[in-house]
Amino acid sequence: MANAKLTITAREEGKNPRQIRSLGFLPGSIYGKGMEAKNIQINTHEFEMAYKNNQDAVWELSMEKEKFNAKIQELQINYATNEFLNVEFALA
C-alpha cells in the first residue's frame, strides 16, 4: 500500500461547496476518533493527480503545523462529468 501526500487548508467560512469548486478547490472533511471534524479544501488538480495512482493509499495530509494519516472514507463524483464533488477522510 502506497502513501500519498497532500497539503490541505481549512475551508473558507461563508462559502458553499459550489463556490469552493469554482475556485479550483475540492471541499472535504477529515474526522476520526477523539478529534472534532474539520472542514477542509484541497487543490483539485493536485488531488486528481495523486488519486489517479493512489486510490487505496494512506494519505498524509498536512495542514499548517498539523499532520494527519487518513484513508478516503467517501468520494463523491459526478459521473456525467467525472468531476470530484467532495471527499471525506477518516483517520487511519
Image: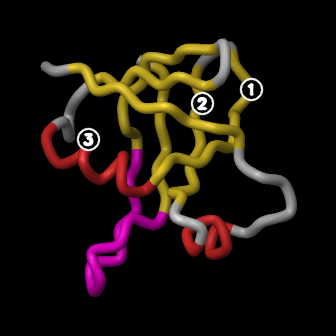
- Point out residue 20 in the picture as x, y percentages from the top left corner: 64, 65
Task: Of the two numbered discs 2 and 1 on the same chain, state the one appearing first in sequence.
Answer: 2
The segment highlighted magenta reads: 74-85
Q: Nearer the viewer, mark 2 or mark 3?
A: 3
Question: Does 45 sit left or right of 57 as displayed?
Answer: right
- Point out residue 42 in the picture as x, y percentages from the top left corner: 51, 47
Residue at the spot of label 3: 50
Main SS category, magenta section: strand
SS state under label 1: strand
Residue at mark 1 to residue at mark 3: CA–CA distance: 26 Å
Three-letter amino acid code of the residue under disc 3: Ala
Front-most of 44 and 31?
Answer: 44
Picture residue at 36% right of the left edge, 47% below the top:
47
- Point out residue 65 in the picture as x, y percentages from the top left corner: 66, 13
Q: Are the two marked residues, 2 and 1, in contact with CB atoms closer than 8 angstroms?
A: yes
Q: Residues within 10 Å of mark 2 (few under 14, many from 20)?
A: some
Quadrant position of the C terminus in the picture: top left
Residue at mark 2 to residue at mark 3: CA–CA distance: 20 Å
- Point out residue 68 in the picture as x, y percentages from the top left corner: 51, 17
Q: Nearer the viewer, mark 1 or mark 3?
A: 3
Residue at the spot of label 1: 36
Residue at the spot of label 2: 31
Asked if the stretch drawn in magenta spans residue 9, the answer is: no
Picture residue at 18% right of the left edge, 36% below the top:
54
Picture residue at 64% right of the left edge, 38% below the top:
9
Picture residue at 69% right of the left edge, 35% below the top:
38
Three-letter amino acid code of the residue under disc 1: Glu
